[in-house]
Image (cartoon, helix red, strand yellow):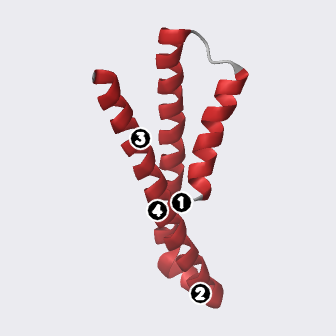
């Protein structure tokens, strides 16, 4: 029961991270296009672009923390992850970023 709740929260957290990354990436793309039309605009929206980059960086850090937490939980229950399991876990994160 507790494991199911943990898994649901973990899946929700990962989905939220991916959603936040998607929005921040789209907004950063818009800002880049805006700046690209006139380099003088950088002084107007440079700080905004930096905030979007910070959001992307934080989401990366969140994914790393979640991965470490999963690894620790898995190690406590089943021992160290083998290379195949590690690759599968990282592949699932990468797939989510591409979507």
Q: Residues within 10 Å of mark 4 (few under 14, many from 20)?
A: few
Q: Quadrant of the C terminus?
A: bottom right
Secondary structure of the residue carrying tag 2 is: helix
Task: Tell me the mark number nearer the camera, choosing from 2 and 3.
Answer: 3
Q: Is residue 95 above or below residue 87?
A: below
Residue under label 2: 40
> Contact, CB < 8 Å: mark 4 with mark 3?
no
Residue 51: mark: 4
Q: Quadrant of the N terminus?
A: top left
Q: Residue furthest right?
A: 83
Q: CA distance from mark 3 to mark 1?
A: 24 Å
Q: Position of residue 79 (x, y in %)?
A: 57, 9
Residue under label 1: 53
Q: Earlier in the sequence, mark 2 or mark 1?
A: 2
| Point 65% across, 41% down: residue | 91
Residue under label 3: 11
């Amino acid at each position: 029961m507790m494991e199911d709740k943990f898994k649901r929260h973990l899946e929700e957290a990962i989905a939220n991270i991916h959603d936040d990354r998607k929005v921040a990436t789209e907004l950063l793309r818009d800002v880049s296009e805006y700046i690209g039309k006139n380099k003088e605009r950088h002084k107007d929206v440079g700080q905004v672009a930096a905030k979007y980059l910070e959001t992307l960086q934080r989401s990366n850090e969140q994914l790393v923390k979640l991965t470490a937490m999963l690894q620790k939980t898995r190690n406590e229950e089943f021992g160290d992850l083998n290379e195949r399991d590690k690759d599968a876990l990282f592949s699932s994160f990468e797939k989510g970023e591409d979507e």
